[in-house]
Amino acid sequence: QEQLVESGGGSVQAGGSLRLSCAASGFAITPFCMYWFRQSPGKEREFVALISYDRSTKYTDDVKGRFSVSKDTSKNTLYLQMDSLEAEDTAVYFCAAGRRPLFSCQDQDSYYWGQGTQVTVSS
């Protein structure tokens, strides 16, 4: 059974850093598009970053230059390094995997989801 488990969330002051991890089981992440999303109270879930099967990356404008997505296929784990955190980054962060391997990351229409991890940034 495919499963994604996030960890690494917590509370940090503005300007600080956190690294989120997402451990996958039941499938190998290598051929899949892997994503980070986030959801703040009262807002819809929004895209944060992705890393493709070919390791190309894409970020939402709000986090460019501050966040970095990576993966370690030997550990079957996705990461999100978050630096220069701002209060506006406060959210529950979710990892996801597109269900169609070796397929366009922008055109995925179904995902496996993790349960989320809370990130709180105080100003």
Image: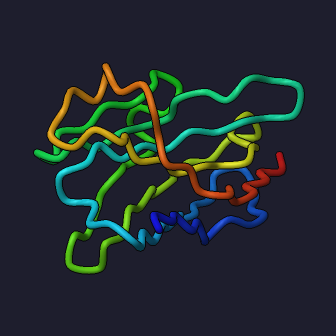
Quarter location, residue 51: top left
Question: In this view, which residue lies farthest toward the front?
Answer: 1
Above/below status of 9 relative to 66: below
Q: Residue at x 28, y 60 (%)?
A: 29
Q: How many badges with numbers are in the image?
A: 0
- Check the image and report above or below for 19 versus 41: below
Determine whether, in the image, residue 28 is placed left or right of residue 3.
left
**Measuring 57% from the left and 61% from the top, which residue is drawn there?**
17
Q: Where is residue 38 in the image (x, y as percent from the top left)?
A: 64, 39
As drawn, which residue projects farthest toward the left? 54
Where's residue 2, x and y in %? Answer: 45, 64
- Picture quadrant where residue 71 is located: bottom left
Residue 104 versus residue 56: which sits nearer the camera? 104
Residue at image location 52% in from the left, 29% down from the top: 47
Residue 32 percent coordinates (x, y): 25, 48
Determine whether, in the image, residue 84 is placed left or right of residue 61.
right
Q: Quadrant of the C terminus?
A: top right
Tell me residue 33's x, y (percent). 29, 43
